[in-house]
Image: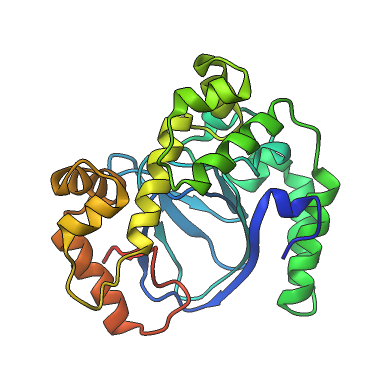
Amino acid sequence: MPRPPLDGLIDDLYYLAGAPPYARLTLPPAPSALLIVNLGAPFRIRAGTEIEAAEYADGCVITMATRASEFGYPPRTRSVGVHFKPWGLAPFVPMPAAELCNRPVTVEQVWGRAAVAELRDRLSEADGPHEMMTLLEEELLRRLRETAGLGLVRHTSGVIAATSGAVSIGELGTAAGVSSTHLAQRFKELVGITPKRLARTYRFTTTVFAMDPSGPIDWGHLASVAGYFDQAHFGHELRAFTGLTPTRYLEVRRQFLREHPGHTLDGWPLPAD
């Protein structure tokens, strides 16, 4: 668990090394931002089906997305990274989050070439994953800055998360004493998307994590429990977030379970091969 005050901005730090389960993985939008410091061979990201894949050697920064991204991995990968809460990346980047929405950038573009080169050197020389994550945590503490509007966005996002997206956005603004327009503007600056879109993302991820792909799925019941209007509504959301129909989505989830049982990445990334 990150030390305070990072624990209010970060879900976890992680170390990833070895052979990926698939050469290409699809990553649906989630209520999370991501920082990856790459220590191995370059990887590739395609942020949307209509965009060409770009190569990332030093790593990448990804704010909350509105569409699935495809990660292409080398045969062996090695990196250390951070899963931020939706608002958590804002104090560490100099530009509005909306500018990065669906546009992953290199860490160098955010923190500068010299600083990132030094950080990667220190991480590469670290004595194991725990020291790596401690070094990255210290780097984040050093870079942490005051961010206007963060308290408002953090509190409102917390309410959205606690209700799994089943909350009136208009009522959130009223409760916070601001207009819906002001709230949406702050969210775009610090999260990259609107509160309504964040609520959709929380509802979708909550529904997906409630699924057991190893058994039969009652799509109508699943949609009803999650608060979707009907099964067709959930199917539309599933295609919007993953690019897959419910039937195909279940097939690829089961493929992952079958081919890599118990893998640490199972449950969210989807095989793209």
Of residues 103 and 234, the one drawn nearer to the viewer in this rendering: 234
x and y percentages locating residue 194 in the rendered image? 47, 29
Residue 197 lies, in percent from the top left, at 41, 34
Which quarter of the image is occupied by the N terminus?
Answer: bottom right
Q: How many marks?
A: 0
Figure colour scheme: rainbow
Between 250 and 211, the residue placed more toward the observer is 211
Q: Residue at x 20, y 54 (%)?
A: 244
Q: Is residue 176 left or right of residue 259?
A: right
Task: Answer with left or right where residue 93 lies relative to residue 269.
Answer: right
Q: Is residue 94 visible?
A: no
The residue depicted at 57 percent of the width and 76 percent of the height is 17
User: What residue is rendered at 35% in x and 82% in y?
Assistant: 260
Q: Is residue 195 left or right of residue 151?
A: left
Can residue 231 be seen? yes
Quadrant location of residue 7? bottom right
Q: Considering only vertical position in the picture, is 116 above or below 211?
A: above
From what the image shows, is residue 50 above or below residue 272? above
Residue at the spot x=64%, y=29% of the render? 95
| Residue closest to the eye, 119 or 113 | 119
Residue 23 in which image quadrant? bottom left
* Vertical relation: 85 (above or below) 94: below
Q: Position of residue 209 (x, y in %)?
A: 38, 63
Residue 103 screen position, x and y as percent: 47, 38
